[in-house]
Image (cartoon, rainbow, N blue to C red):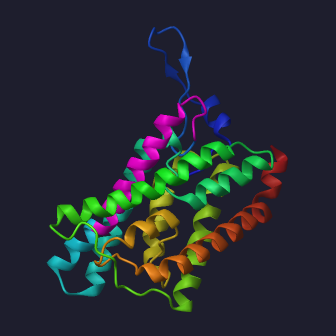
Amino acid sequence: MTTTEAAEQDRAGESDIAPDGSGRGPQPAPGATPPRTPLTARATAEFIGTALLVAVVIGSGIQATELTHDVGVQLLANSIATVFGLGILILLLGPVSGAHFNPVVTLAEWWTARRGGDGVTAREVAVYVPAQVIGAVAGAILADAMFAKPLVEWSTHDRSAGHLLLGEVVATAGLVLLIFGLARTDRLRFAPVAVASYIGAAYWFTSSTSFANPAVTVGRAFSDTFAGIAPASVPGFIGAQLVGGVIGLALVTLIFHQVRSAE
């Protein structure tokens, strides 16, 4: 869920000893999509990462509702598990695929690359996004299986209210601003902590509990549990997330334009 903006600068300042001990190999920062990594490996990382992220979100929600009837405690448990799970996944898979786990981030990176930055190509987008969506569905099924729930049970949790859609716009715009702001200022190495912390906070300060991810939104429709979303609410959420992504990129350009120019 991060961007390759400034990835070459990250690699230039870091090193790794080559297997023969005689050279310096690339050491990309977490969140930078390494261009030398085979696309198959990157797609697999996106699939696995998104699947595990959704499994964490849904699984922790199921566990929380089985342990307590206090909705506040349920949300606290769900958000804490998501923060730690997301941070670990970004740290682990960032050097492989960039740890996008999110079509909005992938599309935003592609748009940035079209305008002269580093990032994924259209062909890579066409591989990343399906991997993320399929991974999200697989993660939902896995979470249901672990808790002896029906493997596929459409959620009945309606989330179509306008204020929830506004929450998704805000959550996604903030996420894109954070990721690409870190890239513009050459601080992608902080992505695991920064992105996970932001999502954890957005659970609580947005009315929608910060889905901020079309793939995760689709996956969560497959589970009629605490973290679920009714299929009828999915298009509205995805539309709001795409709008948020556009706003986030506009804010990056407005706020960090001088930083980019100075480089």
Q: Is residue 234 left or right of residue 249?
A: left
Q: Residue at x 44, y 65 (%)?
A: 216
Of 180 and 57, nearer the camera is 57
Specify whether 113 is left or right of 53: right
Report the residue at 45% width, 60% height from top: 196
Task: Please say whether residue 85 is visible from this viewpoint.
Answer: no
On the image, the x and y values in percent for residue 158 come to 41, 87
In-image side of 214 versus 248 (left or right): left
261 shown above or below 178: above
**Figure quadrant of residue 119:** top right
Residue under the image location 55 percent in, 90 percent down: 163
Picture quarter with the C terminus: top right
Query: Relative to 122, does residue 66 appear above or below in the rendering?
Result: below
Q: Residue 262: say if magenta.
A: no
Segment colored magenta: 33-58
Number of marks in the image?
0
Q: Position of residue 83 (x, y in %)?
A: 38, 62
Q: Residue at x 47, y 50 (%)?
A: 131
Give the prevailing secondary structure in the magenta stretch: helix
Measuring from the top left, give residue 137's x and y in whole percent: 38, 61
Answer with the quarter of the image where residue 240 lies. bottom right
Q: Is residue 31 above or below residue 237?
A: above
Whole-percent x, y for residue 165 in the image: 56, 83
Q: Nearer the viewer, residue 53 or 144?
A: 144
Q: Is residue 158 visible?
A: yes
